Amino acid sequence: MKELQHLRKYFYKYRVQLTIGIIITIISNLFKIFVPKLIGSIIDVVNEQQEKGSTGDLTAYKAELLEYILYIIGTAVVAGILTFFMRQAIINVSRYVEFDLKNEIYNQYQKLSLNFYKKNRTGDLMNRISEDVGKVRMYAGPAIMYSINTITLFVVALTFMYKQAPSLTLYTVIPLPILSVLIYKISKQIHKRSTVVQEYLSKLSTFTQESFSGVSVIKAYGIEPQTSAKFNTLSTTSKEKQLSLVRVQAFFFPIMILLIGVSNLIVIYIGGKQYIEGLISLGTIIEFIIYVNMLTWPVATVGWVTSIVQQAEASQKRINEFLKLEPEITNTVETPTTIKGTIEFKDVHFTYDDTNINALKGISFKVNSGETIAIIGKTGSGKSTILDLIGRLYDIDNGSILIDGNSIEQINLNSLREATGYVPQDAFLFSDTINNNIKFGKEDATNEEVITAAKNAQVHKNITKFAKQYETVLGERGITLSGGQKQRVSIARAIIKSPQILLFDDCLSAVDTETEEKILNNLNKLTAEKTTVIVSHRISSAKNADHIIVLDEGKIVQKGTHETLINTDGYYKDLYLKQLSAKEML
């Protein structure tokens, strides 16, 4: 249970509720234990009456029996009420622990860098925060409750039994050591197989999540049969792993019932001999049989609880793998930083460690607050990487990045990102209303601000054509909208934030040239006092920038203004002439 020690902080947090639950459990079991003793007393009274063979007044005899019966009913009712409150106390704690653990995992996910998400699949991440946490919750609630209940009942019952008949009690517990050995052996197999089951559940979750997200591609290529076949293979393997686990778990209950049966036989045989010898009463034998059968469910739950604990241990181990990861990007400055927007790269080198691609090789440039810089280059030349580094989604290998003259590592990370508006090429929209998607950039924005941002992004007219307009709920990843519409909503989301730094990553690639021109004119007005970095393949997006740099294989091969570069032989001029010719042909 090494991995489950992570939950100790939560048990300490809810120690009052757990303590109350434990106390109620003990009291509840004390009331339960009185029932067999009362029944045994009834048997002794009846047996004594039969031996006397009295045919006289049975009033006193009946009154005594009625008194015992009322005691039995009373103790059963009290035990039932206490059991209800025991479950309320302990099971509720498990839900609190589940809530806290999910939040802890989610917060950790948000802290981890992009590299983490490149190396791990979404389905696996989802499985750990749902299926694995569910397994751990079963340990934090039912397993603890039944363990406490079993231990308490065993201690109390065996104490009562030993006081009644010490030698008979010792014979009765003979099967327990055998039970302990079997539990140890089987629990090892459960832990091993539970880990494999959870891993395959993650694979299954990942495959289905990717299939649903990419269903348009699957349909376009007509590969539904192949996809179904792959899912069937993965599902079958997962089923086999589940059955492998269930086969081991299935040993527990038959073994428990067998051992309980053996204990009953021992009570009847040894108890019967002792009764014949006059060492114990008939009521004691009945009392012992009830005690043994009363322990049937607690003993049976030992196997169930062991299975839960082993599965929880395997799941918590998977959870801890991510919780123990240290975020690559950390906030080194606690106090907020005021961002004005001057950006400077000094001999920056950067390599992606997951692919070992050397994306930037000695990049140096400076853009002052309120200026615009455009970055042009071929695919894979390192343009988007520069934007990621400005937002400090990665830390560089060598060189330095300065924001307002200070190293980017010495700036409050939250302040930097709050002062930045980012529009990616592949616009990501949430499955929510258009209004809320735009408000993502500014949560407290008014409806007027939302409409103004949409107009500046040239998407307002498109939105008003929808039946529910701004309250239209988008499909997953914004699938309801076209590529150009998604990009423009993403632009609206960035500009409504009114950040000091705006980063545009080829975000007009799906927009026609006429709309692009209108958006750029609006952006020129809105970004007059903001630092703007534009990544584009279009000269039209870059021509009005204060600075233009051209990248090729991670190096700056050209820099200057639009007028300078179109009069200088090189990539920029060639691209300009090519796009100019294409425009004239239209």
Image: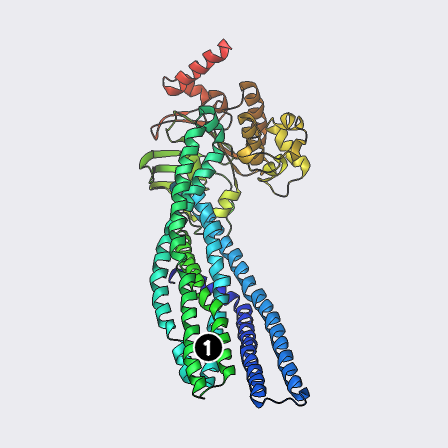
In the displayed structure image, the side of residue 500 where residue 128 appears, left or right: left
Q: Nearer the viewer, residue 542 or 319?
A: 319
Give amino acid for label 1. Val
Residue 110, compared with residue 264, is above or below; it is: above
Task: Where is residue 461? Give x, y as percent.
Answer: 65, 25
Q: Which residue is mark 1?
A: 155
Quarter of the view holding residue 169? bottom left
Q: Nearer the viewer, residue 229 or 318?
A: 229
Taking the spot 46% from the left edge, 11% from the top edge, the residue there is 581
Task: Where is residue 126? Give x, y as percent.
Answer: 47, 46
Task: Where is residue 283? Give x, y as percent.
Answer: 52, 82
Residue 72, compared with residue 49, is above or below; it is: above
Q: Nearer the viewer, residue 403 or 99?
A: 99
For label 1, count other residues whose C-alpha is less than 10 Å away and answer few (under 14), some (14-19) or many (20+).
few
In the displayed structure image, the side of residue 12 where residue 397 appears, left or right: left
In the displayed structure image, the side of residue 266 where residue 517 appears, left or right: right
Taking the spot 49% from the left edge, 9% from the top edge, the residue there is 585
